[in-house]
Image (spheres, rainbow, N blue to C red):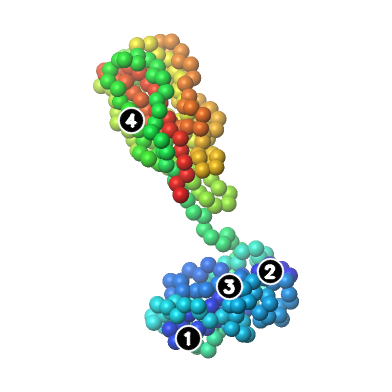
Amino acid sequence: MLLKRFFWLTVALSNGVGCVNEAPGVQDTTDALLRDVVIVEMDMDAPPDAMDSPDLFSDSDALDGGGIMPSEDADLATDIDAFDGSLTVDFTVPDVDANELDPDLSDMALPVADQGVDVAISDISPSDMDPPQSTGVSNSAPPLQTVVRGNPNGGARFDDVCPDGQVLIGVAGEIRNGNQYLGRLRGICGEVRIELGNPMSIGTLAGADLPLRGAFGGGVNFGVTCQAGSAVVGFSGRAGNLVDQLILHCGSLSLDGINVVAIGNMPLPPVGGNGGDPIALITCPDGQTAAGALIRAGDGIDGFGLLCSPLTVRP
């Protein structure tokens, strides 16, 4: 047969129990008045004229003869007092080729027992049985710092950490006026969201802007961020007694069991000038992403490092 499964829909009414007993694939009622609905799965390996056979039910004890299933909980009929005699409900049919459905099914009214109420099936179409759900992540351990490049003892130290559930995705700031080194700098965070649909996807939404560090800018403004679904995993650049140039490196976020890890190493465009000496690539430990920025600053940006943390999926 075309349809792999049928479902029996039982509606609890205030003065009795009714049943819609010939609705293939009935699923996912959306009207609040039908939230007290019981759906029983039924395997369909037999011809349609055997639909009322108790043997077709995966749980034949739920039957009360003739395909009518009484409610197991009399308290189901809590909101039916507001029933006005008619109700339109949208249903979806999973695992069904819509082109092969009987056209008459797309707009039919089925009686609900003898209660004088019609339930109109106004739309039958293939879809996922449940809408995709989403969740976030948790920074599951206190962040650990990488080494600091530039002057590790210059200025004051600022450990700027993104809020829980967010990761470092970029930086913004200003070049020192008349110079080529970084005068002011702040981190940019992004919220990690995991869409648990089919297919699953991981994205980043706008998050917190961390405090601006450094006293003097006045030159060119800059801002760089990782592409959506990525986070900072490392940095390189140029430095002497101050940070002359900063290059962030990004990795794409991916699920690894209950952990979220960053894969790859994509450098962003450099910000700053060409003074100082090259900074070799510094990265977070394996399995961790940047959860914040370690900035040493006074008049300008003296030193820079990352604060790294593992990420786990929220239950």
Disc 2 crowd, CA 10 A, few/some/many (<14, 14-19, 20+): some
Residue denoted by label 2: 3
Residue denoted by label 4: 160
Disc 3 crowd, CA 10 A, few/some/many (<14, 14-19, 20+): some
Residue 5: x percent and y percent?
A: 66, 69
Report the Cα–Cα distance between label 3 and label 1: 19 Å
Is residue 245 shown left or right of residue 121? left
Residue 272: x percent and y percent?
A: 39, 19
Mark 2 or mark 4: name the one nearer the start of the chain: 2
For residue 277, which numbered disc appears in the image? none
Mark 3 or mark 2: name the one nearer the start of the chain: 2
Residue occupying image coordinates x 37% and y 21%: 304
Report the Cα–Cα distance between label 2 and label 4: 57 Å
Residue 121: x percent and y percent?
A: 55, 75
Mark 4 or mark 1: name the one nearer the start of the chain: 1
Residue denoted by label 1: 16
Mark 3 or mark 4: name the one nearer the start of the chain: 3
Label 2 is placed on what type of residue? Leu
Residue 107 appearing in the image: no
Where is the N terminus found, in terms of image quarters? Answer: bottom right
Label 3 is placed on what type of residue? Val
Label 1 is placed on what type of residue? Gly
Residue 122: x percent and y percent?
A: 54, 73
**Label 2 residue SS:** loop
Report the Cα–Cα distance between label 1 and label 2: 31 Å
Residue occupying image coordinates x 39% and y 31%: 143
Disc 4 crowd, CA 10 A, few/some/many (<14, 14-19, 20+): many
Mark 3 or mark 1: name the one nearer the start of the chain: 1
- Evaluate if marks 4 and 1 touch, with contact meaning CB atoms under 8 Å apart: no
Residue 60, compared with residue 226, is above or below; it is below
- Evaluate if marks 1 and 2 touch, with contact meaning CB atoms under 8 Å apart: no
Residue denoted by label 3: 40
